[in-house]
């Protein structure tokens, strides 16, 4: 799925930086007063050249910030973020990927191509994203991602190790996530991948929610992610989830402001309807997107799937009528689970998803309440060896359990603030 409303602006490409080599020999006449003075002077000059080169790399990010007039994304001028993230040369990144060989290619998105590399400078396997200047995203997204991730530190956010801003080259260097994206595991099954079981799905949902909570509640200033989707949730060892791709991130409203007015950006199927219609971005916009992801985890369906019958192509539109009829809950479960899920856990997960994708943003819960509910849900382990296998029920034979006991209360019945 691609991002929409990403108009391809013509960005004037800066001229490639030329390495200034001073070939003039120093005139030492009248300067040597004792042994070692010339060597000291040469050493000082060499150190100054090295520092100047390092400053040039850092300053390129600052220049991008100023040229794009980015002031609100977490740093005034890019210098703070530039110092927190390492700078790498293009030559170093090219060498780590064998000059971006095809066998190092691991994926492609709106930003550009992603390669796996072994970076000798830090002795680590990394993922390197190279900006496609003809792609959907551009230098603005590159800068926003550097500024956002350089200020962030959370186990459920992918770690930015550094960047390259050299001439017209823009690259991002991340920790490598060996299991790929959640999208691949849910929607692109292969013999080499195991079907995600119920416990793993709830673990991923809870971890993604914690990452979103950090952006909304812990970061200063708070950040609206704006691009939460399955392809942006990467999985590490043990299916540990981390949010990635922060190029569309936006600093949230502060003080008495309720929203941020901005051009509508995001991915069709995940974008909150209120934001799509008005351009008014709130933290609840992310909550809606999270609800879509949770529905994908439960159902195994894509947010938008044009291969299905017309009424089933939009996941939220297909699911909403079923939220009102508990007899249909078992029909909504991913058939690949083959009945291996807890009935009460299913009811609770669907209740959370239903609240997140409410059309009115003030009726959606805040992310902190979602984290609390999913933490509990993920702690209730389903054991396929001892727990009963469920069958798809289409009639009134679904288990009779009190509704109040089934559904985790997250935010109660009263509307929540934006």
Image: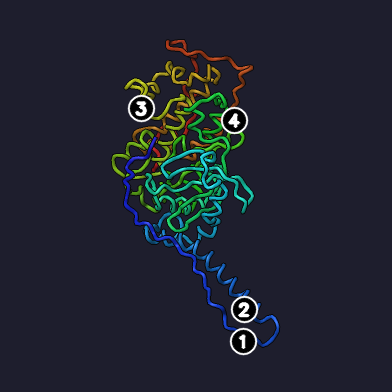
Indicate which disc residue 41 carries: 2
Q: Secondary structure at mark 1?
A: loop
Mark 2 / mark 3, whichever is N-terminal: 2
Q: State yes or no: discs 1 and 2 in contact (Cβ < 8 Å).
A: yes
Residue occupied by mark 3: 314
SS type, badge 4: helix
Alpha carbon distance from label 1 to label 2:
10 Å
- In the picture shown, does residue 260 fall above or below 390? below
Which residue corresponds to mark 1?
31
Label 4 close to label 2 by CB (< 8 Å): no
Quarter of the image with the C terminus is top left
Mark 4 vs mark 2: give the one in front: 2
User: Do tag 1 and tag 3 residues touch (Cβ < 8 Å)?
Assistant: no
Mark 4 or mark 1, whichever is nearer to me: 1
Percent from the top left, x then y, of residue 317?
A: 35, 26
Query: What's the CA distance linking mark 4 and mark 2?
Result: 65 Å
Residue 205 relative to residue 11: left or right: right
- Label located before the other in sequence (4 or 2): 2
How many residues crowd around disc 1 within 10 Å: few (fewer than 14), some, or many (20 or more)?
A: few
Disc 3 to disc 4, how far (Cα)?
31 Å
Q: Which mark is residue 51?
A: none
SS at circle 2: helix
Residue lying at the far right of the rendered structure: 35
């Amino acid at each position: 799925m691609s991002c929409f409303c990403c108009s391809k602006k013509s960005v004037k490409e800066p001229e490639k930086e030329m390495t200034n080599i001073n070939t003039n020999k120093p005139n030492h006449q009248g300067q040597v007063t004792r042994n070692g003075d010339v060597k000291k002077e040469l050493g000082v000059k060499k150190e100054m050249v090295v520092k100047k080169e390092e400053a040039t790399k850092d300053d390129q990010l600052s220049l991008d910030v100023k040229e794009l007039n980015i002031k609100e994304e977490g740093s005034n001028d890019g210098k703070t973020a530039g110092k927190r993230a390492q700078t790498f040369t293009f030559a170093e990144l090219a060498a780590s990927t064998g000059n971006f060989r095809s066998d190092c290619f691991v994926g492609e998105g709106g930003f550009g191509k992603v390669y796996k590399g072994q970076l000798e400078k830090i002795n680590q396997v990394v993922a390197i994203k190279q900006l496609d200047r003809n792609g959907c995203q551009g230098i603005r997204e590159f800068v926003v991602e550097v500024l956002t991730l350089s200020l962030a530190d959370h186990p459920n956010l992918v770690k930015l190790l550094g960047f390259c801003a050299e001439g017209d080259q823009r690259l991002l260097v991340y920790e490598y996530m060996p299991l790929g994206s959640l999208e691949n595991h849910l929607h692109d099954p292969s013999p080499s991948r195991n079907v995600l079981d119920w416990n793993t799905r709830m673990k991923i949902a809870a971890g993604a929610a914690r990452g979103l909570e950090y952006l909304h509640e812990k970061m200063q200033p708070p950040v609206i992610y704006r691009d939460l989707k399955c392809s942006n949730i990467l999985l590490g060892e043990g299916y540990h989830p981390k949010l990635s791709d922060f190029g569309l991130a936006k600093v949230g409203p502060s003080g008495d402001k309720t929203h941020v007015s901005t051009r509508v950006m995001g991915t069709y199927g995940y974008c909150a309807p209120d934001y799509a219609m008005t351009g008014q971005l709130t933290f609840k916009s992310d909550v809606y997107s999270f609800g879509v992801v949770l529905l994908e985890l439960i159902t195994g369906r894509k947010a938008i799937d044009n291969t299905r019958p017309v009424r089933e192509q939009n996941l939220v539109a297909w699911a909403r009528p079923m939220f009102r009829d508990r007899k249909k809950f078992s029909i909504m479960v991913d058939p690949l689970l083959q009945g291996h899920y807890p009935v009460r856990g299913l009811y609770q997960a669907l209740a959370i998803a239903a609240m997140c994708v409410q059309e009115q943003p003030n009726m959606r819960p805040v992310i902190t309440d979602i984290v609390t509910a999913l933490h509990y849900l993920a702690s209730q382990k389903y054991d396929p060896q001892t727990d009963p296998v469920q069958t798809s029920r289409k009639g009134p034979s679904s288990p009779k359990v009190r509704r109040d006991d089934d559904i985790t209360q997250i935010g109660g019945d009263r509307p929540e603030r934006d």
